[in-house]
Amino acid sequence: MLATVELFTRTGGIILSRWGHFLAGITWIGLLWYFNFVQTPSLAQFEAGPRVELQRKLLGRALWWFRWGAMFTVLTGIMILGFQKNFDGNYMKSGPGLSISTGILFALIMWANVWLVIWPNQKVVIANADRVAAGQEPDPNAASAGRKGALASRTNTLFSIPMLFFMAATSHFAPVFDTSKGSHRGIYYIIVLVIAAFFELNALGVLGGYAPSPTRKFLDDHRQTIAVGVGIWIVLMIAWQVLFT
Ligand code: HEM
C-alpha cells in the first residue's frame, strides 16, 4: 500500500512519466519501423487498385497513432527531465547528461520530421488516393510529396538506431565515463551536430534535391538504412571511447 502511495509523489512522477514514455515511444517507433520495414517494401508490389485502397483506409489511421505517439513521447520525455530534476547542477556536463542530450537531439529532429515533413506530405498522398478512387485526375504533386515523406521517414529510421541507444545508455552505460573536460565535450557535440545536420539536410533535399544519388541511395533500401544507422552508432561509440576514457 505504502509503495502504491509513492506513485503520487515525485518518485511516482518519475516512474509514471517513464512508463508513459515507453508506451508512447513504442507506439511511434513501432509504426515507424512497420512503415519502413514492412509497408513500403510490400506496397511497391501491390497493384494500383489495392494500393489506393490501403492509402485511403489504413494509412490515415496508422499516421494518427504515429504522429500522436511522437507528440506524447516528447511530452513524457520532458516530464521525466522535470521530475528527475535533470536540469539542476552539473547534470548536463555528466556522462548521463551527454547521453540524454544526444538521444534528445536525434529525437527532436525525428519529431520535426514527423510533424513538419512526413504528415503534411502524406496528407497529399491520401487526398490523391481519394481523388483517384472518385475517378478524378490524379494530383501531379502526389509522387513528389510521397518521395519527400519517404526520405524523411527513412532518415528517422536511421536516427532511431543511435537515438534509442543513447536513451537507454543514459542510466545504464554513460555514468562510468569521464566527461569532465569541457574541450572534449565540445568536440563530441561538434561530431554529433555535424552528423545530425548532414543526414537531416540530405533528407530535406538541401544536398542536391530528392532524386536517388550516392548520398541518398542507402535511403532507398531499408537494410542499407539500418547499416548506416549502426555505422553512426559505431562512430559515436569511438568518440566516447577516445574522448571520455
Ligand atoms: C525529445 C524527445 C525525448 C525526450 C525529451 C526524452 C527524454 C528521456 C529521458 C529524460 C529519459 C530518462 C533517462 C534516464 O535518466 O535514464 C529517457 C529514457 C528513455 N527514452 Fe526517451 N526521450 C525522448 C524521445 C524518446 C523516443 C523517441 C524514444 C523511443 C522509443 C525514447 C525511448 C526511451 C527509452 C527506451 C528510455 C529508457 C531508458 C532506460 O531506463 O533504460 N525516448 N528519455
Image: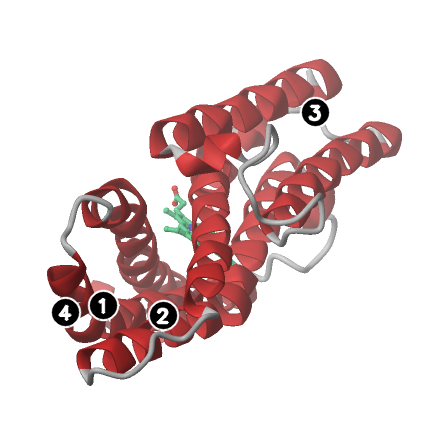
Q: Residue at x 85, y 34 (%)?
A: 182
| Badge 1 vs badge 2, beta-carbon distance below 8 Å | yes
First in residue order: circle 3 vs circle 1? 1
* Circle on res. 53: 4
Would you say 54 lies left or right of 75 here?
A: left
Q: Is mark 2 in CB contact (under 8 Å) with mark 3?
A: no
Residue in the image at 69% along x and 59% along y = 88
Q: Residues within 10 Å of mark 1 (few under 14, many from 20)?
A: some
Q: How far, Cα to Cα, is label 3 from label 1?
A: 50 Å
The residue that mark 1 highlights is: 55
Query: Distance from label 4 to label 3 (Cα)?
Result: 55 Å
Question: Which mark lies nearer to you, 3 or 1?
Answer: 1
Give me the C-alpha separation between circle 2 and circle 4: 12 Å
Indicate yes or no: mark 2 CB to ligand 1 under 8 Å. Answer: no
Contact (Cβ within 8 Å) of mark 1 with mark 4: yes
Name the residue type under label 1.
Gln
Mark closer to the chain start, 1 or 2 = 1
Q: Secondary structure at mark 3?
A: loop
Image disc number at residue 178: 3
